[in-house]
Amino acid sequence: MRILLAGAGGVGSAVVPIAARRDFFDHIVVADYDRSRAEAVVARRTVPGPDGPRPDARFSAIGLDASDQDAVEAALREHACDVLFNAVDPRFDMPLFRAALNAGAHYLDMAMSLSSPHPSRPYELTGVKLGDEQFALAPEWEAGRRLALVGMGVEPGLADVFARYAADHLFRSIDEIGVRDGANLVIEGPDGEEGFAPTFSIWTTIEECLNPPVVWEDGGWHTTAPFSEPEVFDFPEGIGPVECVNVEHEEVLLVPRWVDARRVTFKYGLGEEFIGVLRTLHKLGLDSTRPVNVKGAEVAPRDVVAACLPDPATLGDRMRGKTCAGTWVRGTGKDGRPREVYLYHVVDNEWSMREYGCQAVLWQTAVHPVVALELVARGAWKGEGVLGPEAFDPVPFLDLLNEYGSPWGMREQ
Amino acid sequence: MRILLAGAGGVGSAVVPIAARRDFFDHIVVADYDRSRAEAVVARRTVPGPDGPRPDARFSAIGLDASDQDAVEAALREHACDVLFNAVDPRFDMPLFRAALNAGAHYLDMAMSLSSPHPSRPYELTGVKLGDEQFALAPEWEAGRRLALVGMGVEPGLADVFARYAADHLFRSIDEIGVRDGANLVIEGPDGEEGFAPTFSIWTTIEECLNPPVVWEDGGWHTTAPFSEPEVFDFPEGIGPVECVNVEHEEVLLVPRWVDARRVTFKYGLGEEFIGVLRTLHKLGLDSTRPVNVKGAEVAPRDVVAACLPDPATLGDRMRGKTCAGTWVRGTGKDGRPREVYLYHVVDNEWSMREYGCQAVLWQTAVHPVVALELVARGAWKGEGVLGPEAFDPVPFLDLLNEYGSPWGMREQ
């Protein structure tokens, strides 16, 4: 398997050291708009040689503009890649998705094509939903006999695998599947105080938090106002209770396509401070992706916000705590009695920094697509068309995740 | 008197209709970085003619970059201007100030050259203070026998005139002079809801609110943390109580140079929502004036914030309420008994829109420098060097302000 990894940002730079410990692929071409960023990620990969460490020839770096579909197609062909691994902002999903389709490559992403709200009733009805643009092209992927594995990070990704696992092995019928994400991570500022520094792409976080959250209920999707239905969820492994609110997320769109459940939700443990920041950005229009003219330069305010904050990939040294992703499921167990479980995956930042030099949130996002690609490479996961993680057998995935040294857990509620 | 008005923004565009009703000047050249903005302001000035309204020949428009000192000097000479009236952001004070000095013109501004905080103890000690760069050139202005009238808007400006009036006519000795600014203005959004829209330049508001506030006490200046010493001040004419906090402002630097007082402060009635917005902008680094690279474009985050918000000059139609600027003075009256007064000036947005087509905050800032220039033109105010408003006799100013149809008031506390 030859992989074109588009994006050497937070997640892309964590994918490389994870993949480097595995042997399922032949080559990974790391591509970034900023070629030097891709080169830096590759330069850190070495193997022992007779005269000391030498570069790991399984990795190479190129410059590539993810918004330029033709350039991506050309890169896939030039480097003879079987798979396009999309690790850039989801706004670039469609050119990458079409480039892979045209070049006859498989495709994987961790966030689906973007939504746009209902024009008149945004907080009740869906407009264009997450992934709609991608699913619209499903017949072409099927005809080309190629796999587009969408939403294959941690959330969406592992969370969807958990949902399928619960449906297959734990429940007879499911009332609600609720993805719940929380952490007790803190960032120490240069002065020792706790500073404000999102642990994941602020661009994506704004996108998912300020769009109308989507809920699956009784056979259909509807939306709510941002930050709706706050609930306190008790996270495992010492993280404890965190206030979570509804957020637009792919699981709610993916899970019901393959798993029967009366209700599917996604709630994010944002915390009060972060919600306040997002509300203010929205109030001032600083969340907007529409360019404004600033003394002759055209810039999108959201890009400026991102440029002002520290790169999440650089925060690991100053971060303490754990992050938890997981899927809470309530329904009727195989024995016919009420059952409630939380399937989860916790990463301790201290561990991910020590083991991989990556901060916890980015490492956790990066490990699952690597596991998925290994399953595809080995033939354990086979498929054609546009498929979510819950379209596949969850058992080999969960087994292989354990083999990667990062076990998952289950709590009966 | 021939005036070069640098800046056709919020205040500059309010100066023109106020000046147009007076006859103390021969010509005003309206200059702006965006020439079309200057032209639009001038185009609104007409006089009756035999064949209907014709342009008022006392006004003309040019394009001018306020950061280009040579260009400003050349414009002053080309248009034979006696006075440079600075109505742009205070970051351009120094090139304008030097251009006027070199061209032998008088100079007036409404905000003084910028401060920079003390490098190690910013919330205790002053660093470079507001106006320091300007006062450093005072000997050159004196040698050139030209007047640089600094801080001559409403606050600073009228507030300083009030301080001098209190010292000359109301008090034997003064314990504290506290400038207090508050309003009950609300902006109706396009949807009828109250929206977020600052009524004055956000660039300047961020500058004055996030810099360490300065306080004069017992013969010296010191600084505090932003938003310190909150107090509720009861504003007159129906505005009522507003929470005010310490803010860096020129009056604290100007008043003690000419008026004896044990303590001088400036407190701004920002309100809770606005303070929250400013704190968030600061937390995210969006208040910064240092350019960041945003996909190849270099932009200052604060300029982006300004570009995202509506132009304060366009808000008058959607604004309701009154704004109050004033000076509270406490000490020993001429009769030897304790006295406390608030000298104030209130502008009702409905009135300023109807009379001048200008929103209240900008009109209130614009009227006082026009009054001051009329006093200079008529010889009632004479001076050489770098002088604040409190260096002059306040009585002719306050009398002429009444003649402009915008009376001031005094409340015994």
Image: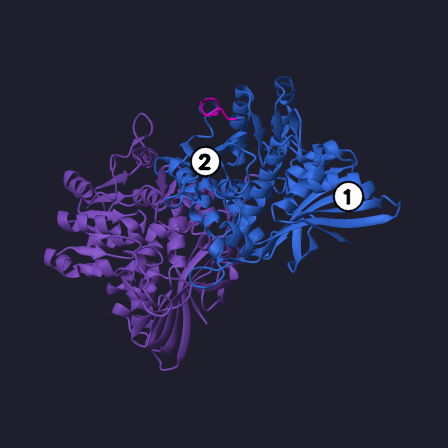
Chain colours: A blue, B purple
Report the side of A369 relative to B277 (left or right).
right
The chain ID associated with circle 1 is A
Please tell me which of labels 1 and 2 falls first in the chain. Answer: 2
- B157 and B367: which one is in front? B157
Residue A77 inside the magenta-drawn segment: yes
Q: Position of residue A313 (x, y in %)?
A: 48, 47
Amino acid type of disc 2?
A: Phe
**Residue depth check, mark 1 versus mark 2: number of the one nearer the observer:** 2
Q: Is residue B49 magenta?
A: no
Give above or below for B79 relative to A232: above
Q: Nearer the viewer, residue A11 or B330?
A: A11
The chain holding disc 2 is A
Could you tell me if residue B358 is visible in this image? no
Label 2 sits on a secondary structure element that is strand
Q: Is residue B389 above or below residue A7?
A: below
In the rendered image, the vertical position of residue B249 relative to residue A381, given as above or below: below
* As drawn, A334 above or below B321: above
Q: Which mark is residue A59?
A: 2
Check disc 1 and report the residue beneath it: A176
Q: Secondary structure at mark 1?
A: strand
Q: Amino acid at mark 1?
A: Glu
Query: What residue sits 88% from the left and 48% below the top?
Result: A337
Quadrant for the C terminus of chain A in the image: bottom right
Residue under the image location 78 percent in, 39 percent down = A167
Residues drawn in magenta: A75-81
Q: Which mark is residue B55?
A: none
Residue at image x 79%, y 46%? A330
